[in-house]
Image: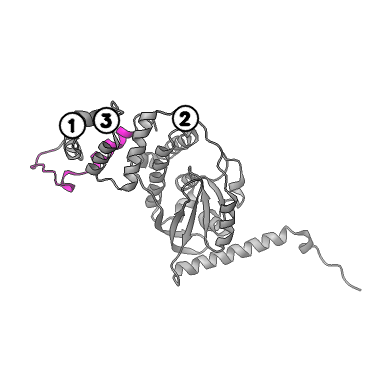
């Protein structure tokens, strides 16, 4: 998690994952002692000297220009999210900011109103560390119905966190038919956030906790994969309504919390399952409201 070595670790990891045959580098049938590209091969592709690239990967040079980073990104065949991540890591190494605790994240009133008007579309509001800041009734029922509906209103240290839930909560883990795919998406997003907010001590404490408590998280984190998941399909296995396929979409204004919604294809069995869940959620809510209203539960006096 140390910002001083993240750039070098990322470069080394991605270099080892890129096979010579993938980019037309001839090997002439030789036995290679290391996986992926050699440093000199990558340096040649990027148009920089081997000694300079070696210093960069070993954390001995903090002077890489945006143009050099773009050349290295091209040689590594990075996508747009990975390119932004590479530049963020270089900035972290240059600035070497000290960790500090950030101000508590809150849900703007406009976002709460947005949750209300979504109606029967499951939605949750996530902070940058994946803390659940709010959810509507159907979002709660779909993603974490085993938790108390008011859990997001708890103090920050006790509110639900989707990264923790995905890796450490058996109920949420069982929700996803392809759990490793969901888990990799969570890790990839956290990598992006960690590079954008290197000074966030609370975030780095979360990463340390997950690494210590989940060998799977530690392994995925060490893989240095970066993934921005604005839109992704997931097959879910809900304990109340059975299997359904949803498209999880992340809606962001660019600043502050994001809203994650789950949609289904019109006329599909998944849409019917979601409607059934909405009905069950509405009935449960009505029963809870009824039981909490003494006027509605008080026996009527007999007339006579």
**Residue 180 place in picture, x, y as percent:** 37, 50
In percent of the image, x 22 and y 42: which residue is there?
A: 75
Do the numbered discs 1 and 2 sit on residues whose CB atoms are within 8 Å?
A: no
Q: Which residue is drawn at 38% across and 45% down?
A: 188
Which stretch appears magenta? 7-31
Image location (x, y in percent) of residue 287: 67, 62
Residue 222 shows in the view:
no
Circle 2 sits on which residue? 99
Quadrant of the frame with the N terminus: top left
| Relative depth, front residue between 219 and 125 | 125
Q: Which of 50 and 31 is in front in this view?
A: 50
- The x, y position of residue 265, in whole percent, is 43, 67
Position of 45 relative to 171 (above/below): above
Q: Which mark is residue 49?
A: 1
Contact, mark 3 vs mark 2 (Cβ under 8 Å): no
Which mark sits nearer the N-terminus, 3 or 2?
3
Marked residue nearer the N-terminal end (1 or 2): 1
Residue 264, quarter of the rendered image: bottom left
| Colour scheme of the rendered structure | one colour
Q: How many labels does the image show?
A: 3
Q: The C terminus appears in which quarter of the rendering?
A: bottom right
In this picture, is 204 found above or below 18? above
SS under mark 3: helix
Residue 59 visible somewhere in the drawing: yes
Per the image, label 1 sits on a secondary structure element best described as loop
In the rendered structure, are the residues bearing label 1 and label 3 in contact, judged by CB atoms less than 8 Å apart? no
What secondary structure is marked by label 2? loop
- Whole-angstrom CA distance, mark 3 to mark 2, is 23 Å
* Residue annotated with mark 3: 56
């Amino acid at each position: 998690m140390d910002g001083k070595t993240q750039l070098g670790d990322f470069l080394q990891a991605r270099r080892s994952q890129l096979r010579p045959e993938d980019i037309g580098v001839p090997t002439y049938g030789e036995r290679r002692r290391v996986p992926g590209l050699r440093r000199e091969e990558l340096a040649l592709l990027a148009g920089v000297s081997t000694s300079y690239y070696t210093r960069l990967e070993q954390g001995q040079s903090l002077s890489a220009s945006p143009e050099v980073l773009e050349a290295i990104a091209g040689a590594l065949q990075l996508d747009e999210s990975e390119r932004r991540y590479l530049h963020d890591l270089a900035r972290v190494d240059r600035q070497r900011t000290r960790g500090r605790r950030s101000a508590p994240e809150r849900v703007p009133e406009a976002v709460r109103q947005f949750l209300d008007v979504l109606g029967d579309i499951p939605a949750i509001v996530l902070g940058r560390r994946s803390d659940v800041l709010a959810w509507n009734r159907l979002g709660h029922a779909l993603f974490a119905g085993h938790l108390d509906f008011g859990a997001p209103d708890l103090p920050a240290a006790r509110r639900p966190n989707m990264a923790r839930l995905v890796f450490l909560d058996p109920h949420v883990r069982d929700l996803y038919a392809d759990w490793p795919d969901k888990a990799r998406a969570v890790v990839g997003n956290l990598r992006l956030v960690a590079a954008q907010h290197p000074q966030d001590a609370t975030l780095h404490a979360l990463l340390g906790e997950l690494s210590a408590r989940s060998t799977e998280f530690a392994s995925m984190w060490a893989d240095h994969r970066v993934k921005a998941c604005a839109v992704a399909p997931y097959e879910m296995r809900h304990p109340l309504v059975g299997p359904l396929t949803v498209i999880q979409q992340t809606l962001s204004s660019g600043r502050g919390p994001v809203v994650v919604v789950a949609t289904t294809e019109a006329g599909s069995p998944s849409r019917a399952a979601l409607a059934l869940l909405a009905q069950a959620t509405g009935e449960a809510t009505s029963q809870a409201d009824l039981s909490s209203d003494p006027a509605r539960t008080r026996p009527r006096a007999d007339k006579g």
